[in-house]
Image: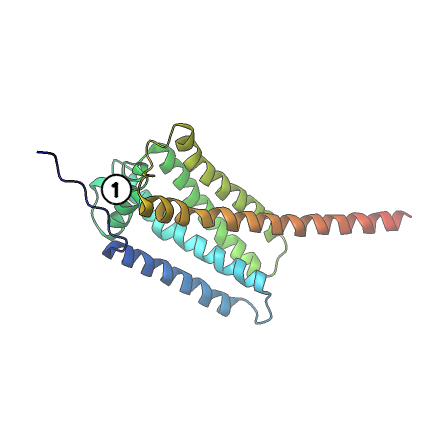
Amino acid sequence: MSPAPTPAPSIFTTTSLYSLLGVAFVGTVAYVGSKTLLPKNASAKDRFTFIWLAFDAMIHFSFEGSFLYLSMFGRQVNTSTGPFAELWKEYAAADFRWGTADPTVVSLEILTVLGAGPMCCYILWQLVRNDPARHYWIVVLSTAELYGGWMTFCPEWLTGSPNLETGNFLYLWVYLVFMNVIWVFIPFWLLFDSYQYISTSLRATQAVGKAKKA
């Protein structure tokens, strides 16, 4: 007698609900922070940047920070219990490495939580003070996050994605694609915007210097 087929995962589980509520709460806090800390005449671009960086920082510290806790000093998600463990077990169904404390993933997450998270907070402080030096750090942060995403998935693509569940619509398009693609498009946009600001400022300074010498 052949074994019964494994039932398809539910599109919306209890863990999904709590995860989405957590993300919504983080987004709400980020939005309220922008309304509270930025001046009323702040541009839409600066307000969006603030919301994204605040959201980014809180995701790094809470969600990814919990992954680090569950994946270091002999621990791993698959043998852990608790709300965050259940959240990461669901994601680990799409990318098996997150359930077994894969050393490459953990190494990248150490840099993300301890490096990118504080850097987001520092840029937020600069943004509130309207310090143009933030554009340098935005370039650093965006480059680091793009590199982290590349190093998370490129080794899998080169080896035929042995740890990725790509045959399931939910796991592939919701967990692997949708939940990661925003950390590609938004850092790319921030990188381009800061490049424009820095290059325009340097060219203007160069033009003034040439005019003084003339």
Q: Which residue is mark 1?
A: 77
Q: Position of residue 105 (x, y in %)?
A: 37, 37
Q: Secondary structure at mark 1?
A: helix
> Few, some or many C-alpha atoms within 10 Å of disc 1 (few <14, some 14-19, many ≥20)?
many
Res 160 visible? yes
Extreme residue in the front direction: 1
Q: Nearer the viewer, residue 29 or 212?
A: 29
Extreme residue in the top direction: 159
Q: Which residue is painted at 35% across and 47% down in the image?
A: 175
Q: Which residue is painted at 49% across and 52% down in the image?
A: 120
Quadrant housing residue 161:
top left
Res 138 visible? no
Q: Position of residue 107 (x, y in %)?
A: 39, 36
- Quarter in which the N terminus is drawn: top left
Q: Which residue is painted at 33% across and 43% down in the image?
A: 68
Classify 62 as above or below 156: below
Q: Position of residue 128 (x, y in %)?
A: 55, 62
Q: Nearer the viewer, residue 73 or 56?
A: 56
Q: Which residue is painted at 41% across and 65% down in the image?
A: 28
Is 38 situated left or right of 195 in this image? left
Extreme residue in the left direction: 1
Q: Nearer the viewer, residue 40 or 175?
A: 175
Extreme residue in the right direction: 214
